[in-house]
Amino acid sequence: MSGSRKKDGGGRARRDTVSLDIAARPRRNRKSPSVRALAAETRLLAENLIYPLFVHGGSADEDIKSMPGKKRLGADGLMREVEMSVNAGVTAFILFPVVEDSKKSPDAREAGNPRGLIPETARALKKQFPDATLITDVALDPYSSDGHDGIVSSSGEILNDVTVEALCGQALAHAEAGADIVSPSDMMDGRVGAIRETLDENGHTGTSILSYTAKYASCFYGPFRGALDSAPKAGDKKTYQMNPANVREALRELALDEAEGADIVMVKPAGYYLDVVSAFRESTDLPVAAYQVSGEYLMIKSAAAVGGISERDAVMESLLAITRAGADMIATYFAPEAANFLRRFET
Ligand code: PBG
């Protein structure tokens, strides 16, 4: 190094003329906002965001304690939230139902009710916003008195095949109500193929399937379960959701979902599973989605609330990182906020 310095008579480097003999100076590509934008490898776009929304069938909006700033929406509140988001550039939505206890049962039969909360909400939304993309969640937990995504046997086992049958009925009810994409989040084996067959047999060949392909048994769903009041009454979800230790198993699920006809494959959660997102990106030509879940939302909100980080910067950095890892689309509770930040974002 010292040999490359310009020296004065005494052999000591003069600070103002010190110059390394290096041709490559990566900092040149970071020298101004405009140059940084030219050289950016990853771009975040509002149109790649999906906004998850909670509906409860009542008229008033209700605050969600576990998710500050988010609400269980009433009918009018939902339309307002969708309109606000569409104006911000977010046009894809995923709906989750808050189901009253009297409609929950061990067989979760309300899930397949063609006149249930989600089908009715889907009809109303598609009527008012025909160009928006409506995604519905296919899983039994909001309707299950056991709080599980599947039907529970008398011995406490989560039954796979009878659950898949119920999921097919649920997906069909959603497709008939106009859902553009149905999204199984239950992690039962064989459900993507069975849902595809049911939809096709009933003339819904155009309804897409966004599969929660690698959904991990994560503590970061806690705030969501608070929002829906859907936590398991007994046990946990580890016999169907994946072990956070595994990535090869995620690729096995990916191969199965591709073979069964999934249109989009999702990794969930997102931020702690970026290696899985990038493994998906390398292994499939299908679009890859990632879900920044309720716990990831709450961590950013909480850290910002105590002044530890800038909410705006944390939202943008986390979404950029998920995109960089290989996600084509991201489900995030920050969708409209991020879309608004994007209008003035400098990397
Ligand atoms: C239920 C479902 C869950 C989420 C989406 N669909 C919760 C769970 O599996 O327990 C979590 C979403 C979030 O935490 O934001 N099938």
Image (cartoon, rainbow, N blue to C red):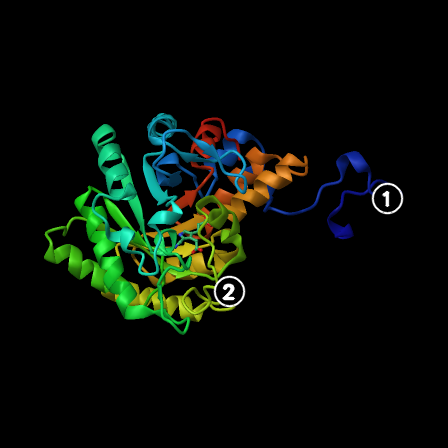
Q: Residue furthest right?
A: 10
Most foreground residue, 101 or 65 = 101
Most foreground residue, 49 or 11 = 49
Which residue occupies 68% across, 38% down?
308
From the image, tell me which residue sits under label 2.
Answer: 244
Q: Which mark, by number, is residue 33? A: none
Q: Position of residue 287 (x, y in %)?
A: 32, 52
Q: Residues within 10 Å of mark 1 (few under 14, many from 20)?
A: few
Amino acid at pointer 2: Pro
Q: Position of residue 331 (x, y in %)?
A: 40, 45
Whether residue 17 is visible, yes or no, is yes
194 on left or right of 28: left
Amino acid at pointer 1: Arg
The correct choice, above or below, for 162 with respect to 16 in the image is below
Most foreground residue, 161 or 287 = 161
The correct choice, above or below, for 20 with respect to 109 in the image is above
Dot 2 falls on a residue whose secondary structure is loop
258 on left or right of 215: left
Q: Position of residue 245 (x, y in %)?
A: 52, 68
Task: State the count of labels.
Answer: 2
The correct choice, above or below, for 147 with respect to 323 in the image is below
Q: How much space separates mark 2 and mark 1, taking CA atoms?
A: 56 Å
